[in-house]
Image (cartoon, rainbow, N blue to C red):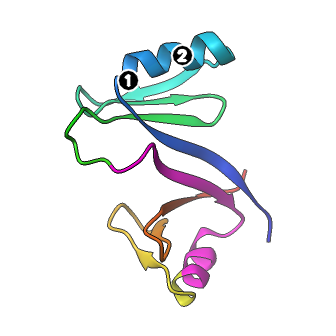
Amino acid sequence: MRAQIHHAALNADPLDWYVSFFETVFGMEVRKTAGKAPHRKVWFHQGIQLNECAAGSGQAGPCDHVSIAVEDVEDTVKAALARGCTPLPNGANWFVLPNGFPLELMELA
């Protein structure tokens, strides 16, 4: 089975500073934006997703989740659950590792 990182999602406060940072320092280009403050999301073409998390939002840590692209999402989720992972309500392609870290699966292009 082939797999590769699809994107990494970071919690960002203040969001506008992080967007400017990734654009200026790394030359990244925004691909998509969604939501309204204080729950905006920004995706860059280069595989970084920023999730706005205002102070006191309860977001734990700087990394929100990692998305892995796989050949067969359904089979990979089944294999993960069989090894002790727990499904998340975010969708059939989401689960949490035993240490509490969430993973999102996407179809490999």
* Mark 2 Cα shell of 10 Å, populated few (<14), some (14-19), many (≥20): few
Percent coordinates x, y for residue 94 in the rendering: 46, 65
**Residue 99: which numbered mark, if any?**
none
Q: Quadrant of residue 89?
A: bottom left
User: Does 64 appear in magenta?
Assistant: yes
Secondary element at tag 2: helix
Quadrant for the N terminus in the image: bottom right
Residue 1 falls left or right of residue 86:
right
Percent coordinates x, y for residue 69 in the rendering: 66, 56
**Residue 15: which numbered mark, if any?**
1
**Residue 21: which numbered mark, if any?**
2
Query: What residue is rendered at 50% in x and 13% in y?
Result: 20
Name which of mark 1 and mark 2 comes first in the sequence.
1
Q: Amino acid at mark 2?
A: Phe
Query: What residue is rendered at 50% in x and 72% in y?
Result: 97
- Magenta segment boundaries in residue numbering: 60-80
User: Marks 1 and 2: CB-CB under 8 Å?
Assistant: no
Taking depth in this image into account, of 25 and 107 the one nearest to the observer is: 25
Secondary element at tag 1: helix
Query: What residue is rendered at 35% in x and 61% in y?
Result: 90
Query: What residue is rendered at 72% in x and 65% in y?
Result: 71
User: Does 45 appear in magenta?
Assistant: no
Residue 74's place in the image compared with 7, above or below, is below
Percent coordinates x, y for residue 7 in the rendering: 60, 44
Q: Residue furthest bottom?
A: 82
Residue 30's place in the image compared with 78, above or below, is above
Q: Residue furthest right?
A: 2
Q: Quadrant of residue 39?
A: top left
Percent coordinates x, y for residue 16 in the rendering: 39, 16
